[in-house]
């Protein structure tokens, strides 16, 4: 407790740290201000009432901080950036040149890779904005727009998304923590009060046991997220001894910490973003004059309305993206080469290919635990909803997972900054 107050005192008294925290607060305030500015010529009340009974778009609405329900200028949130990240990381798996740019070109290569993601976000934002407008029109949530109004709205929506992405980059540079993650967390927290109010407005005394069980599940989820995200698999590493003159260098024993949740919260966000496409296609094809498109719409609608099937696909996607993102961000071969160059080795394992295989096996085993946990938490709201009939917290598990993981990462970075200044 004393250490906590000392760090808090350092955070408040140190001017540079205080300015970083205040900048994050100001940037998130600007984000919330933008989220309530509606696109002109759109009745946000009709859209809000339409989203009440649409739990699938409710996930996207939460990630955008309620921007979709308000049809605000930042209604897309950072969705285009997330989609562009998925595409570029898929390309890194298929193209050795892109992978080299991402992993082996140093800081300059990473900056160039992120620049490509930002450039790709612009056409994706146009596509997503157009899809949202057409889908809401097909569902009667908004009226038909003239060509001039459609172009104007598209420019505003895309510009708002790029503005939000720029705010996230400013947080990375002048604040503390990941700007995109903090924006997502702020959006979820902003939506939570309305979800809680929605529950209590429909609450009856007969639902008290269910409510207590739900609270207990929420506490267990938070504790599980903290445990999984803090868990590490230490791999022992020994540095070879070398004699230089009269000094002996090396011979130290340390360990390589492999996190159980290497992918963090990104698999949940990737899976949620990907599952929006069936919703769009079902709505757009529903009014088509072609029979094949109507059949596709009917099949997708059946899939979306079959909760156990939707939850199963969601679970599989979360597990897949956990392995995928871990494979992109953690390269056992590169780690093995760095250990060998530094004169280090894993006791009992030969340097080189044997070390690569050893690290790959460890990462595969621990990722299985982390991916299953993420998948269970992701589909937990569907299980609770189907057993209790309460829809007010339909996105509770995903929201808790994202918020808690982002808070843990933010605390780590604040501790690092405070320790550096101390």
Image (cartoon, rainbow, N blue to C red):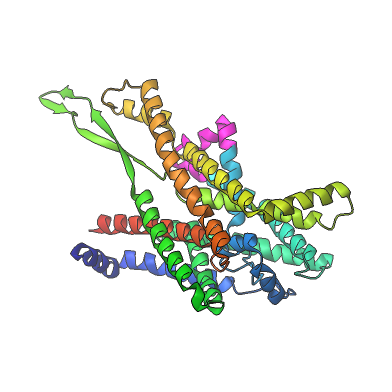
Residue 274 appears in view: no
| Residue 95 shown in magenta | yes
Q: Residue at x 28, y 59 (%)?
A: 418
Q: Is residue 86 above or below residue 338?
A: below
Residue beneath the point at 74% across and 58% down: 130
- Give the x, y percent position of residue 410: 38, 58
Instruction: Decide which of 85, 159 is in the foreground and name it.
Output: 85
Q: Position of residue 159 (x, y in %)?
A: 65, 62
| Residue at point 59%, 60% (across, down) | 59
One can see residue 383 in this view: yes
Quarter of the image for the C terminus: give it: bottom left
At 56% across and 36% down in the image, what residue appears?
92
Q: Is residue 347 left or right of residue 19?
A: left
Q: Is residue 70 magenta?
A: no
Q: Main secondary structure of the magenta part?
A: helix
- Quadrant of the image containing the N terminus: bottom left
Residue 420 against residue 251 in the figure, above or below = below
- Count all numbered tags in the image, as a single digit: 0
* Segment colored magenta: 91-112
Name the residue at the front extreme.
Answer: 206
Q: Nearer the viewer, residue 271 or 410?
A: 271
Residue 316 position (above or below residue 237): below
Where residue 66 sits, quadrant-wise, is bottom right
User: Which x, y percent locates residue 365?
Assistant: 41, 35
Res. 238 image quadrant: top left
């Amino acid at each position: 407790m004393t250490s906590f107050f000392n760090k808090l005192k350092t955070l408040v008294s140190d001017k540079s740290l205080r300015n970083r925290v205040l900048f994050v607060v100001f940037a998130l305030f600007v984000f919330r201000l933008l989220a309530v500015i509606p696109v002109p010529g759109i009745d946000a009340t009709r859209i809000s009432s339409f989203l009440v009974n649409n739990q699938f778009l409710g996930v996207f609405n939460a990630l955008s901080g309620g921007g979709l329900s308000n049809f605000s200028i930042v209604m897309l949130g950072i969705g285009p950036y997330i989609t562009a990240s998925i595409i570029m990381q898929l390309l890194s798996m298929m193209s050795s040149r892109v992978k080299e740019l991402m992993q082996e070109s140093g800081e300059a290569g990473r900056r160039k890779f992120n620049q490509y993601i930002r450039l790709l976000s612009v056409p994706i934002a146009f596509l997503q904005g157009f899809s949202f407008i057409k889908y809401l029109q097909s569902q009667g949530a908004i009226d038909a727009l003239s060509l001039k109004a459609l172009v104007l709205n598209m420019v505003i929506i895309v510009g708002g998304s790029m503005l939000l992405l720029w705010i996230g980059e400013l947080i990375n540079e002048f604040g503390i923590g990941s700007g995109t993650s903090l924006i997502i967390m702020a959006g979820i927290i902003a939506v939570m009060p309305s979800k809680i109010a929605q529950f209590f407005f429909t609450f009856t005394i007969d639902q008290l046991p269910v409510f207590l069980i739900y609270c207990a599940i929420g506490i267990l989820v938070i504790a599980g997220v903290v445990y999984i995200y803090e868990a590490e698999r230490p791999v022992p590493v020994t540095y070879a001894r070398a004699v230089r003159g009269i000094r002996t260098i090396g011979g130290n024993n340390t360990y390589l910490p492999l996190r159980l949740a290497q992918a963090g919260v990104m698999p949940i966000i990737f899976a949620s973003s990907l599952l929006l496409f069936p919703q769009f296609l079902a709505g757009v094809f529903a009014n088509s004059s072609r029979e094949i498109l109507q059949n596709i719409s009917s099949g997708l609608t059946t899939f979306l309305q079959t909760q156990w099937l939707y939850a199963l696909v969601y679970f599989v996607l979360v597990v897949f993206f956990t392995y995928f993102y871990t494979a992109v961000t953690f390269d056992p071969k590169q780690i093995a080469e760095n250990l060998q160059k530094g004169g280090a080795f894993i006791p009992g394992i030969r340097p080189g290919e044997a070390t690569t295989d050893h690290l790959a096996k460890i990462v595969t085993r621990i990722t299985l635990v982390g991916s299953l946990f993420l998948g269970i938490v992701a589909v937990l709201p569907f299980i609770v909803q189907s057993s209790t009939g309460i829809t007010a917290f339909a996105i509770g598990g995903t929201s808790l997972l994202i918020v808690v993981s982002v808070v843990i990462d933010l605390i780590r970075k604040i501790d690092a900054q405070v320790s550096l200044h101390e």
